[in-house]
Amino acid sequence: MSAGLFPSPFPGGADLTFGGGNGLLRSPANEPRKVNAMGNAYEIYALRYATMAPRTPSMNFLAPDPHDATAQDLDYFVWLIRGGGRNILVDTGFNAEEAALRARKLTLNPVDALEAFGVKADAIQDVVVTHLHYDHAGNLDRFPHARFHLQEREMSYATGRCMCNGMLRHPFSVEHVTLMVRHVYGERVTFHSGDGEIAPGVTVHRVGGHSDGLQVVRVDTARGPVVLASDASHYYANLHKRSPFPIVYNVGDMAQGWEIVERLAGHPDRFIPGHDPIVAEIYPRASDKVDAFALHEQPSRSFAK
């Protein structure tokens, strides 16, 4: 369907634009103002809020090396993009109740970590939800002024027939998914179908694989484009070894997703895995109050061959 502008049926509501793929988009009049931070050179911070240990190789790789006896811990992050006076949050983490349900060690609720880093939740205007798994889509009730950006296929997947299967359903929380549906009804969700723009220099790209509507985020920085790969690659090793993480909806899409991530980043040092503790080891610490790491800076270790 070609894009068309329709008046909002709600009093005082903004006009609604339906783009290709029937994604609900903001009208041009309500698009965010252009960002010109050093030519759209944003800062990116990874905020670590939880961890899971110990782990075994079979927990990190679908087909682990039989010679491996140990495995990396799993860190949990949200990501803050800053530039031109705006803050864009990528993913929203989980809270203490979800941590207890799933036996995860929550260091600090990511919303509280953001505040300790100097950003209040009510100041966040845009939240990119890479996918609706519990560790990426909790705390959705704590961002009162945010617009949520989600792939249309992810909402269809999280509310469709696949959720009748316990294995596929396990990484989701029905409370998180239900709250996102409420945000849809509240006209607070922008659906993307494939590629989309959040702001000049910040784009999203569906890769699928781990979850059907998984999207990665490409951000212009002073060191070049950085790709927040989220769970397209939990660890550097998943992509480097072409070895899938065991929670996967479509292995073929996951393999193609690695190629998309590499193409978007343009350099092996410019993709950021979703859960790898190495991130905290190679990027400069950006706060003495929370575990925050500056991803727009050069890493201390290079993966270039």
Image: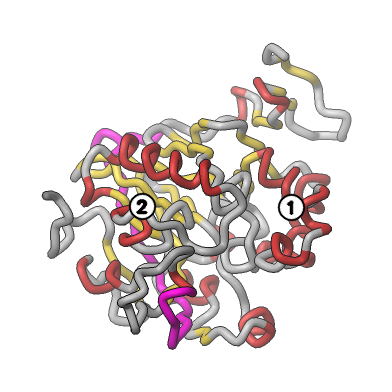
Residue 212 showing in the rendered view: yes
The residue sitting at 29% across, 81% down in the picture is: 288
The residue sitting at 55% across, 44% down in the picture is: 208
Mark 2 residue type? Arg
Q: Residue furthest top?
A: 2
Q: x, y (%) of residue 215?
A: 52, 45
Mark 1 residue type? Ala
- Whether residue 78 appears in magenta in the rendering, the answer is no
Location of mark 2 (residue): 242
Location of mark 1 (residue): 158
Which dot, 2 or 1, sits closer to the camera?
A: 2
Q: The magenta stretch spans which residues?
A: 35-58
Image height check: is 148 above or below 283? above
Which element is circle 2 on?
A: loop
Which element is circle 1 on?
A: helix
Q: x, y (%) of residue 247?
A: 56, 62
Instruction: Report which quarter residue 300 is drawn in.
Output: bottom left
Relative depth, front residue between 246 and 136? 246
